[in-house]
Amino acid sequence: MGAFCDELARCGLRHACTSPGSRNTPIVLSLARTPDIRCWSHVDERCAGFFAVGAAKASGRPVAITCTSGTAAANLMPAVIEASWARVPLIVLTADRPPELRDVGAGQTIDQLKLYGSAAKWFFEVGAHEATPERLRWIRSLACRAYWTALDAPGGPVHLNFPFREPLVLDEPLPEDHTGRPNGQPYVLVEPSTTPAAARGPGLHPSGRLLVVAGAGTPDPHGLAEYTARTGIPLLADPLSAARRGPAAVAHYDLLLRAPAFMSARRPDFVFRLGELPTSKPLRIWLAALADVPQITLDPNHTWQDPDGVVGMRLRGALPQPDQISVEPGWLEAWTGPDREAARSIDGLLGEDLSEPLVARVLGKWLPPEATLFVASSMPIRDVETFLAARDEGPLVLANRGANGIDGTVSSAFGAAAAGGRPVVLLAGDVALAHDIGGLLAARRLGLSLTIVLLNNDGGGIFHFLPVAGEGDAFEEHVATPHGLEFERVASLYGCAYELAEQLDELKGALGRSLPGPATTIIEVRTDRVENLALHRRVADAVMGAMEAAGRVR
Ligand SMILES: Cc1ncc(C[n+]2csc(CCOP(=O)(O)OP(=O)(O)O)c2C)c(N)n1
Ligand SMILES: [Mg+2]
């Protein structure tokens, strides 16, 4: 195991998550004893998996996880699925019983072969081996293969299953291993992928009303913002794309595209789609209805993001060069003008009373560029998309949107704090926090600092936006699921600081205290689910009203 872990470190692995057990002792000891690998210990494997997801997202490098045999390995499943769909490089190292102890009633033994099914990008049953020079060379190449396979685009989780025979701790050290390459080089180097010839732009000459839609995973977001500004193409960018910046950014498309007449008056001639589809439902519906408009994706990760079957061309390298493009005069202003009006309506309507949309909006405005805003699924991710204004140097925005789960959110945010080297603010709902409440252990056990802005509406506020909200007999108990948790007591149980923010300036003050500090703080903002629905409707109506009043609809 020592050679395997040494090789992971030589490839560039810097973080690993461990969880306790007997069978994985050789892996835990080797990871912990590899100088360049920082090991983060977790009690709960589900938390460990999501912590690794957050750490890999924030650092852009593979992160290793190890656990013991049995249901421990099964607890990594949700994180492996998230990593698979979000293309996050993970190296999962499960310990197992050797073949002679499988399926014969030995304890803590389940079938771990291909346990994660199609969610694992690569599975390998490692077997048990003597530490001969031949086998050490093979195990070094195996470690390199695991690392580079996880990282190669599209990234994803790889799973190696290690059967171990007892003794699990050696009486005597193994003979010295000289099989590593000199100067700390990896045993197998992989040539970096080169940009394809198409990088100079395809042979397209689009003209008229061009539009760019950018989601998570957009390549070169800064470059995209400059490109759209230079060419005058409206840029509809999800904050997860990191491209909601520059003079062509249209931040409030989610509200603007709810006005039917606005939508139909802005029919584009070409749509360029980069990265994943944004979450916004109005945007998705609108793009789906544009089946006869050429929609072109730039998709270096080959993700085929096209649930409505409207994409007609996939580019691999780059968008057309600026001199290949001509944009209809006034087209950019036809988007950015209404966007400025939408911003005025939002600000006028939200005022200074703390509400879920206002919290999302002010976090986008206040957080320093060196911060990371980790956003939970449910309304937080939607509010961030709808209400974050464009900003040239805003915080990095991350979220677990591979499978859109509310699970593992706290752990992933801690992982981002551990490996990203930036202060992290987690914006989460109360159910998401309750779901991963055990993730808070990282504050005490790992000494990590995280600022959690908790939007507590005592249940799933998102469900009030859906028809199920009308099903009075079952809605509250089975769908909204209020829990009545007192988060001040949660904070004290897990050794976190706690502040209740009832006013906007209290939120600002609490953020100012927590962000630079070493502690993890829960800043609770209490809201009401029914009022939240009404406020969202008022904002949408106000934006629509502003469009009408300004005669912008037609
Ligand atoms: C693992 C998982 N279970 C269930 C869901 C379905 N789900 C989506 S949103 C939500 C409620 C989230 O509530 P909260 O975190 O309080 O956010 P709010 O809706 O109040 O904004 C649930 C249960 C999910 N996305 N993931
Ligand atoms: Mg809630």
Image (cartoon, grey):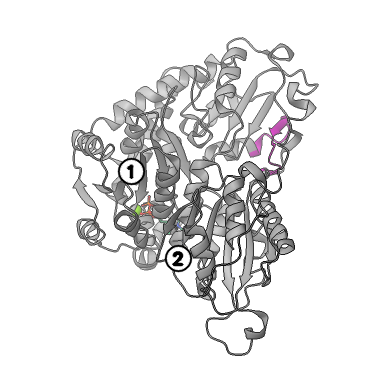
Decide if residue 306 is on the left or right side of residue 464. Answer: right
Crowd rating for badge 2 (residues with CA inside 10 Å; few <14, some 14–19, many 20+): many
Residue 404 appears at what percent x and percent y?
Answer: 51, 52
Residue 402, compared with residue 554, is above or below; it is below
| Majority SS type along the magenta span | loop
Which element carries disc 2, helix, strand or loop? Answer: loop
Which element carries disc 1, helix, strand or loop? Answer: helix
Per the image, is 295 magenta? yes
Task: Measure the C-alpha gap from mark 2 to mark 1.
Answer: 45 Å
> Residue 534: which disc?
1
- Where's the C terminus, which quadrant? top right
Decide if residue 550 is on the left or right side of residue 312. Answer: left
Give the magenta part as a residue range: 288-305
- Where's the N terminus, which quadrant? bottom right
Mark 2 lies on residue: 19
Please say if the residues under marks 2 and 1 sit with CB atoms less than 8 Å apart.
no
Image quarter where ligand 1 lies: bottom left
Residue 163 appears at what percent x and percent y?
Answer: 62, 74
Residue at 68 percent across and 14 percent down: it is: 322
Residue at 23 percent across and 38 percent down: it is: 507
Residue at 26 percent across and 30 percent down: it is: 351
Residue 399 appears at what percent x and percent y?
Answer: 47, 45
Amino acid at dot 1: Ala
The part of the image, by quadrant, that contains residue 114 is bottom right
> Residue 391: which disc?
none
Decide if residue 465 is on the left or right side of residue 261. Answer: left
Residue 414, compared with residue 105, is above or below; it is above
